[in-house]
Image: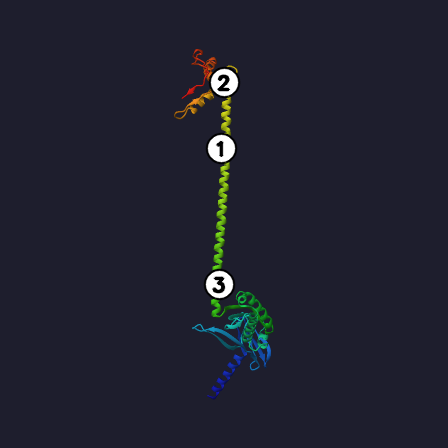
Amino acid sequence: MVGLTFLGIIALIVLFVASKSFKIVGQAEVMVVERLGRFHRVARSGLNILLPFIDSPRTIDVRYFESDVTGVKRVTAGHTSRIDLREQVLNFPSQPVITKDNVTIDIDAVIYYRVADPQKATYSVQNLPYALETLTRTTLRNIVGEMELDATLGSRDVINKRMREVIEEASIGWGVDVTRVELQAIEPPRDIQQSMELQMRAERERRATVTNAEAGKRAAILEAEGVRESQVRRAEGEKDAAILRADGLATARLAMATAEAEAIRKIASALPEGQAAMYLLGMKYLEALPTLAQGKNTTIFLPAEAAGVMGAIGGLRELVNRAGVPGHSPSETKPQAAEEPRKLT
Protein backbone atom coordinates (compact mmCIF):
# COMPACT_ATOMS: atom_id res chain seq x y z
CA MET A 1 0.00 0.00 0.00
CA VAL A 2 2.85 2.35 0.79
CA GLY A 3 4.36 1.62 -2.63
CA LEU A 4 1.10 2.30 -4.41
CA THR A 5 0.64 5.56 -2.57
CA PHE A 6 4.17 6.60 -3.47
CA LEU A 7 3.57 5.74 -7.13
CA GLY A 8 0.33 7.74 -7.12
CA ILE A 9 2.12 10.75 -5.71
CA ILE A 10 4.86 10.40 -8.30
CA ALA A 11 2.21 10.21 -11.08
CA LEU A 12 0.51 13.34 -9.81
CA ILE A 13 3.80 15.18 -9.71
CA VAL A 14 4.58 14.05 -13.26
CA LEU A 15 1.18 15.24 -14.51
CA PHE A 16 1.58 18.55 -12.76
CA VAL A 17 5.05 19.05 -14.20
CA ALA A 18 3.79 18.05 -17.67
CA SER A 19 0.92 20.54 -17.46
CA LYS A 20 3.41 23.23 -16.55
CA SER A 21 5.93 22.18 -19.19
CA PHE A 22 3.73 21.78 -22.26
CA LYS A 23 1.55 24.63 -23.49
CA ILE A 24 -0.54 24.59 -26.65
CA VAL A 25 -1.24 28.06 -28.11
CA GLY A 26 -4.08 28.47 -30.58
CA GLN A 27 -4.06 30.09 -34.00
CA ALA A 28 -3.86 33.94 -33.97
CA GLU A 29 -2.85 33.81 -30.31
CA VAL A 30 0.42 34.34 -28.47
CA MET A 31 1.59 33.91 -24.90
CA VAL A 32 4.19 35.99 -23.09
CA VAL A 33 6.62 33.67 -21.22
CA GLU A 34 8.62 34.90 -18.24
CA ARG A 35 11.67 33.18 -16.82
CA LEU A 36 12.22 33.81 -13.15
CA GLY A 37 9.97 36.87 -13.29
CA ARG A 38 11.58 38.52 -16.34
CA PHE A 39 10.47 38.54 -19.97
CA HIS A 40 11.90 35.57 -21.79
CA ARG A 41 10.08 35.11 -25.08
CA VAL A 42 6.73 35.16 -26.90
CA ALA A 43 5.24 31.73 -27.45
CA ARG A 44 3.59 31.45 -30.83
CA SER A 45 0.75 29.18 -31.98
CA GLY A 46 1.42 25.44 -31.63
CA LEU A 47 3.18 23.31 -28.98
CA ASN A 48 5.50 25.18 -26.65
CA ILE A 49 7.75 23.61 -23.97
CA LEU A 50 8.41 25.52 -20.75
CA LEU A 51 10.78 24.76 -17.92
CA PRO A 52 8.63 23.94 -14.93
CA PHE A 53 8.92 26.27 -11.96
CA ILE A 54 11.26 28.48 -14.03
CA ASP A 55 9.20 29.58 -17.01
CA SER A 56 5.66 30.83 -16.49
CA PRO A 57 3.09 32.58 -18.71
CA ARG A 58 2.26 36.20 -17.92
CA THR A 59 -1.43 37.08 -17.59
CA ILE A 60 -3.02 40.28 -18.83
CA ASP A 61 -6.30 42.01 -18.04
CA VAL A 62 -9.22 41.70 -20.43
CA ARG A 63 -12.67 43.25 -20.48
CA TYR A 64 -15.85 42.02 -22.11
CA PHE A 65 -18.93 44.11 -22.84
CA GLU A 66 -22.04 41.93 -22.66
CA SER A 67 -25.80 42.32 -22.60
CA ASP A 68 -28.10 40.14 -20.51
CA VAL A 69 -31.53 38.84 -21.50
CA THR A 70 -33.21 42.06 -20.33
CA GLY A 71 -31.02 44.17 -22.65
CA VAL A 72 -28.96 45.72 -19.86
CA LYS A 73 -25.32 46.17 -20.85
CA ARG A 74 -22.59 45.29 -18.41
CA VAL A 75 -18.82 45.04 -18.39
CA THR A 76 -17.10 41.80 -17.40
CA ALA A 77 -13.42 41.97 -16.41
CA GLY A 78 -11.02 39.03 -16.22
CA HIS A 79 -7.47 37.78 -16.73
CA THR A 80 -5.93 35.55 -19.39
CA SER A 81 -2.50 34.37 -20.44
CA ARG A 82 -3.47 34.21 -24.11
CA ILE A 83 -3.19 37.41 -26.14
CA ASP A 84 -5.54 37.54 -29.13
CA LEU A 85 -3.88 39.03 -32.21
CA ARG A 86 -7.15 39.49 -34.10
CA GLU A 87 -8.92 42.83 -34.37
CA GLN A 88 -10.92 43.36 -31.20
CA VAL A 89 -13.88 45.57 -30.36
CA LEU A 90 -13.89 47.62 -27.19
CA ASN A 91 -17.37 48.85 -26.39
CA PHE A 92 -18.27 50.73 -23.25
CA PRO A 93 -21.40 52.45 -21.92
CA SER A 94 -22.41 55.88 -23.14
CA GLN A 95 -21.01 58.87 -21.33
CA PRO A 96 -22.27 62.44 -20.85
CA VAL A 97 -20.35 65.06 -22.81
CA ILE A 98 -20.83 68.84 -22.69
CA THR A 99 -20.70 70.71 -26.00
CA LYS A 100 -19.36 74.20 -26.59
CA ASP A 101 -22.86 75.73 -26.24
CA ASN A 102 -23.32 74.02 -22.83
CA VAL A 103 -25.61 71.18 -23.95
CA THR A 104 -25.10 67.81 -22.25
CA ILE A 105 -25.39 64.88 -24.64
CA ASP A 106 -24.84 61.15 -24.21
CA ILE A 107 -22.39 59.59 -26.69
CA ASP A 108 -21.87 55.88 -27.18
CA ALA A 109 -18.51 55.13 -28.81
CA VAL A 110 -16.75 51.95 -29.87
CA ILE A 111 -13.08 51.41 -30.67
CA TYR A 112 -11.51 48.74 -32.90
CA TYR A 113 -7.91 47.83 -32.12
CA ARG A 114 -5.36 45.09 -32.70
CA VAL A 115 -2.39 44.06 -30.55
CA ALA A 116 0.68 44.60 -32.70
CA ASP A 117 3.38 44.06 -30.05
CA PRO A 118 2.41 41.58 -27.30
CA GLN A 119 5.44 42.48 -25.17
CA LYS A 120 4.55 46.19 -25.04
CA ALA A 121 0.85 45.40 -24.54
CA THR A 122 1.84 43.37 -21.49
CA TYR A 123 4.51 45.50 -19.85
CA SER A 124 3.92 49.09 -21.12
CA VAL A 125 0.43 49.48 -19.67
CA GLN A 126 -1.12 47.97 -16.57
CA ASN A 127 -4.66 47.44 -17.91
CA LEU A 128 -4.89 47.82 -21.68
CA PRO A 129 -8.72 47.80 -22.11
CA TYR A 130 -9.24 50.27 -19.28
CA ALA A 131 -6.46 52.50 -20.62
CA LEU A 132 -8.00 52.54 -24.09
CA GLU A 133 -11.45 53.25 -22.66
CA THR A 134 -10.20 56.12 -20.50
CA LEU A 135 -8.21 57.57 -23.38
CA THR A 136 -11.27 57.38 -25.65
CA ARG A 137 -13.49 59.11 -23.08
CA THR A 138 -11.07 61.98 -22.45
CA THR A 139 -10.39 62.46 -26.17
CA LEU A 140 -14.10 62.47 -26.93
CA ARG A 141 -14.75 65.10 -24.24
CA ASN A 142 -11.98 67.31 -25.58
CA ILE A 143 -13.15 67.11 -29.20
CA VAL A 144 -16.86 67.56 -28.53
CA GLY A 145 -16.17 70.36 -26.04
CA GLU A 146 -14.80 72.43 -28.91
CA MET A 147 -17.92 71.98 -31.07
CA GLU A 148 -21.50 73.18 -30.83
CA LEU A 149 -24.47 70.83 -30.77
CA ASP A 150 -25.41 71.23 -34.44
CA ALA A 151 -21.82 70.72 -35.54
CA THR A 152 -21.51 67.65 -33.30
CA LEU A 153 -24.63 66.03 -34.74
CA GLY A 154 -23.51 66.66 -38.30
CA SER A 155 -19.78 65.91 -37.99
CA ARG A 156 -19.51 62.27 -36.99
CA ASP A 157 -16.89 61.51 -39.61
CA VAL A 158 -14.77 64.44 -38.46
CA ILE A 159 -15.02 63.35 -34.82
CA ASN A 160 -14.18 59.74 -35.69
CA LYS A 161 -11.13 60.80 -37.67
CA ARG A 162 -9.79 63.15 -34.98
CA MET A 163 -10.36 60.57 -32.22
CA ARG A 164 -8.55 57.87 -34.17
CA GLU A 165 -5.56 60.14 -34.79
CA VAL A 166 -5.27 61.12 -31.12
CA ILE A 167 -5.80 57.61 -29.71
CA GLU A 168 -3.46 55.99 -32.22
CA GLU A 169 -0.71 58.48 -31.43
CA ALA A 170 -1.09 57.89 -27.69
CA SER A 171 -1.35 54.09 -27.92
CA ILE A 172 1.68 53.48 -30.10
CA GLY A 173 3.81 52.94 -26.99
CA TRP A 174 1.35 50.32 -25.77
CA GLY A 175 1.93 48.07 -28.79
CA VAL A 176 -1.63 48.61 -30.03
CA ASP A 177 -2.76 49.51 -33.54
CA VAL A 178 -6.08 51.41 -33.47
CA THR A 179 -7.91 50.70 -36.73
CA ARG A 180 -11.22 52.53 -36.27
CA VAL A 181 -13.17 54.66 -33.84
CA GLU A 182 -16.93 54.99 -34.33
CA LEU A 183 -19.69 56.94 -32.61
CA GLN A 184 -22.64 54.57 -32.29
CA ALA A 185 -25.20 57.02 -30.93
CA ILE A 186 -25.50 60.66 -29.95
CA GLU A 187 -28.52 61.37 -27.74
CA PRO A 188 -29.33 64.98 -26.81
CA PRO A 189 -31.64 65.76 -23.86
CA ARG A 190 -35.38 65.27 -24.31
CA ASP A 191 -36.19 68.97 -24.52
CA ILE A 192 -33.45 69.47 -27.08
CA GLN A 193 -34.82 66.57 -29.10
CA GLN A 194 -38.31 68.12 -29.07
CA SER A 195 -36.88 71.47 -30.18
CA MET A 196 -34.95 69.74 -32.94
CA GLU A 197 -38.07 67.90 -34.06
CA LEU A 198 -40.02 71.16 -34.21
CA GLN A 199 -37.20 72.81 -36.08
CA MET A 200 -36.95 69.88 -38.48
CA ARG A 201 -40.71 69.93 -39.07
CA ALA A 202 -40.62 73.68 -39.74
CA GLU A 203 -37.69 73.21 -42.09
CA ARG A 204 -39.54 70.48 -43.99
CA GLU A 205 -42.64 72.64 -44.26
CA ARG A 206 -40.50 75.51 -45.53
CA ARG A 207 -38.89 73.23 -48.10
CA ALA A 208 -42.31 71.95 -49.15
CA THR A 209 -43.56 75.54 -49.54
CA VAL A 210 -40.50 76.49 -51.55
CA THR A 211 -40.87 73.38 -53.68
CA ASN A 212 -44.54 74.12 -54.34
CA ALA A 213 -43.73 77.73 -55.19
CA GLU A 214 -40.98 76.65 -57.56
CA ALA A 215 -43.34 74.10 -59.12
CA GLY A 216 -46.04 76.78 -59.57
CA LYS A 217 -43.48 79.15 -61.04
CA ARG A 218 -42.23 76.50 -63.41
CA ALA A 219 -45.79 75.59 -64.41
CA ALA A 220 -46.62 79.26 -65.07
CA ILE A 221 -43.46 79.65 -67.14
CA LEU A 222 -44.25 76.53 -69.13
CA GLU A 223 -47.84 77.67 -69.65
CA ALA A 224 -46.69 81.11 -70.81
CA GLU A 225 -44.15 79.51 -73.11
CA GLY A 226 -46.87 77.23 -74.47
CA VAL A 227 -49.22 80.18 -75.09
CA ARG A 228 -46.44 82.13 -76.75
CA GLU A 229 -45.48 79.15 -78.88
CA SER A 230 -49.10 78.57 -79.90
CA GLN A 231 -49.52 82.25 -80.78
CA VAL A 232 -46.32 82.20 -82.80
CA ARG A 233 -47.43 79.05 -84.58
CA ARG A 234 -50.89 80.52 -85.19
CA ALA A 235 -49.38 83.75 -86.54
CA GLU A 236 -47.04 81.77 -88.76
CA GLY A 237 -49.99 79.72 -89.98
CA GLU A 238 -52.05 82.84 -90.69
CA LYS A 239 -49.09 84.40 -92.47
CA ASP A 240 -48.60 81.31 -94.61
CA ALA A 241 -52.34 81.18 -95.31
CA ALA A 242 -52.40 84.88 -96.26
CA ILE A 243 -49.41 84.36 -98.53
CA LEU A 244 -51.11 81.40 -100.15
CA ARG A 245 -54.38 83.33 -100.55
CA ALA A 246 -52.51 86.28 -102.04
CA ASP A 247 -50.67 83.95 -104.39
CA GLY A 248 -53.98 82.34 -105.34
CA LEU A 249 -55.67 85.70 -105.92
CA ALA A 250 -52.70 86.94 -107.92
CA THR A 251 -52.73 83.81 -110.02
CA ALA A 252 -56.50 84.05 -110.50
CA ARG A 253 -56.34 87.74 -111.42
CA LEU A 254 -53.47 87.06 -113.78
CA ALA A 255 -55.45 84.25 -115.40
CA MET A 256 -58.56 86.46 -115.64
CA ALA A 257 -56.52 89.32 -117.07
CA THR A 258 -54.95 86.95 -119.58
CA ALA A 259 -58.38 85.60 -120.53
CA GLU A 260 -59.86 89.10 -120.76
CA ALA A 261 -56.96 90.30 -122.89
CA GLU A 262 -57.43 87.30 -125.16
CA ALA A 263 -61.19 88.07 -125.35
CA ILE A 264 -60.51 91.72 -126.19
CA ARG A 265 -58.10 90.69 -128.93
CA LYS A 266 -60.67 88.36 -130.38
CA ILE A 267 -63.39 91.06 -130.19
CA ALA A 268 -61.07 93.60 -131.76
CA SER A 269 -60.27 91.20 -134.55
CA ALA A 270 -63.96 90.48 -135.12
CA LEU A 271 -65.09 94.15 -135.18
CA PRO A 272 -64.16 96.90 -137.59
CA GLU A 273 -61.11 98.88 -136.75
CA GLY A 274 -61.65 101.41 -133.97
CA GLN A 275 -65.03 99.97 -132.84
CA ALA A 276 -63.78 97.64 -130.10
CA ALA A 277 -63.72 100.36 -127.44
CA MET A 278 -67.31 101.41 -128.30
CA TYR A 279 -68.39 97.79 -128.05
CA LEU A 280 -66.82 97.26 -124.68
CA LEU A 281 -68.25 100.52 -123.33
CA GLY A 282 -71.73 99.57 -124.41
CA MET A 283 -71.44 96.13 -122.83
CA LYS A 284 -70.33 97.60 -119.50
CA TYR A 285 -73.24 100.03 -119.67
CA LEU A 286 -75.76 97.26 -120.27
CA GLU A 287 -74.31 95.19 -117.44
CA ALA A 288 -74.65 98.11 -115.06
CA LEU A 289 -78.31 98.93 -115.87
CA PRO A 290 -79.87 96.00 -113.91
CA THR A 291 -77.91 96.94 -110.86
CA LEU A 292 -79.00 100.56 -111.11
CA ALA A 293 -82.65 99.60 -111.57
CA GLN A 294 -82.88 97.30 -108.53
CA GLY A 295 -85.36 98.17 -105.79
CA LYS A 296 -88.97 99.33 -105.81
CA ASN A 297 -90.06 102.71 -107.20
CA THR A 298 -86.61 103.39 -108.60
CA THR A 299 -86.44 106.27 -111.07
CA ILE A 300 -83.33 107.05 -113.09
CA PHE A 301 -82.91 110.29 -115.06
CA LEU A 302 -80.45 110.19 -117.93
CA PRO A 303 -78.88 113.46 -119.09
CA ALA A 304 -79.08 114.71 -122.66
CA GLU A 305 -75.48 113.66 -123.25
CA ALA A 306 -76.57 110.05 -122.80
CA ALA A 307 -78.18 110.15 -126.23
CA GLY A 308 -74.80 109.46 -127.75
CA VAL A 309 -74.36 106.51 -125.47
CA MET A 310 -77.79 105.15 -126.35
CA GLY A 311 -77.01 105.64 -129.99
CA ALA A 312 -73.80 103.72 -129.50
CA ILE A 313 -75.74 100.93 -127.84
CA GLY A 314 -78.15 100.86 -130.73
CA GLY A 315 -75.25 100.63 -133.14
CA LEU A 316 -73.79 97.61 -131.39
CA ARG A 317 -76.02 95.29 -133.35
CA GLU A 318 -75.04 96.81 -136.61
CA LEU A 319 -71.39 96.46 -135.68
CA VAL A 320 -71.90 92.85 -134.83
CA ASN A 321 -73.78 92.16 -138.05
CA ARG A 322 -71.06 93.83 -140.03
CA ALA A 323 -68.54 91.61 -138.36
CA GLY A 324 -70.51 88.63 -139.63
CA VAL A 325 -72.09 87.49 -136.38
CA PRO A 326 -74.72 84.87 -137.34
CA GLY A 327 -78.34 85.44 -136.36
CA HIS A 328 -78.26 89.17 -136.94
CA SER A 329 -79.05 91.19 -140.13
CA PRO A 330 -78.24 94.81 -140.94
CA SER A 331 -81.89 95.65 -141.42
CA GLU A 332 -82.67 94.94 -137.77
CA THR A 333 -80.38 97.66 -136.57
CA LYS A 334 -82.24 100.89 -135.86
CA PRO A 335 -80.07 103.45 -134.19
CA GLN A 336 -81.94 105.90 -132.01
CA ALA A 337 -80.97 109.31 -130.81
CA ALA A 338 -82.70 111.25 -128.10
CA GLU A 339 -82.53 114.96 -127.87
CA GLU A 340 -84.22 115.21 -124.46
CA PRO A 341 -83.63 113.46 -121.18
CA ARG A 342 -85.45 110.18 -120.79
CA LYS A 343 -87.07 108.68 -117.78
CA LEU A 344 -86.58 105.02 -117.04
CA THR A 345 -88.73 103.32 -114.45
Instruction: Return the x and y of residue 257 as percentages of the image width and height.
Output: 51, 25
C-alpha distance separating marks 3 and 1: 66 Å
Q: Is residue 134 visible?
A: yes
Label 3: which secondary element: helix
Give the percent coordinates (x, y) of residue 146: 57, 69
Q: Residues within 10 Å of mark 2 (few under 14, many from 20)?
A: some
Quickly name the residue at label 3.
200
- Does the CB distance between marks 2 and 3 fall below 8 Å? no
Local packing at callout 1 (Cα closer than 10 Å; few below 14, some 14-19, many 20+) is few
Q: Which label belongs to residue 245?
A: 1
Residue 272, x across and y down, in percent: 51, 14
* Residue that appears at 58% across and 68% down: 162
Name the image quarter holding residue 113: bottom right
Element class at badge 1: helix
Along the line of sight, which residue is nearer the eye, 72 or 218? 218
Question: Is residue 86 shown to the viewer in this render?
Answer: no
For image coordinates 60% across by 78% down, the residue present is 39
| Mark in the foreground, 3 or 1 | 1
Mark 2 or mark 1, which has the lower sequence index? 1
Q: Marks 2 and 3, how far apart in space?
A: 100 Å
Amino acid marked by disc 1: Arg
What label sits on residue 181 in the rendered view?
none
Q: Earlier in the sequence, mark 3 or mark 1?
A: 3
From the image, tell me which residue sits under label 2: 278
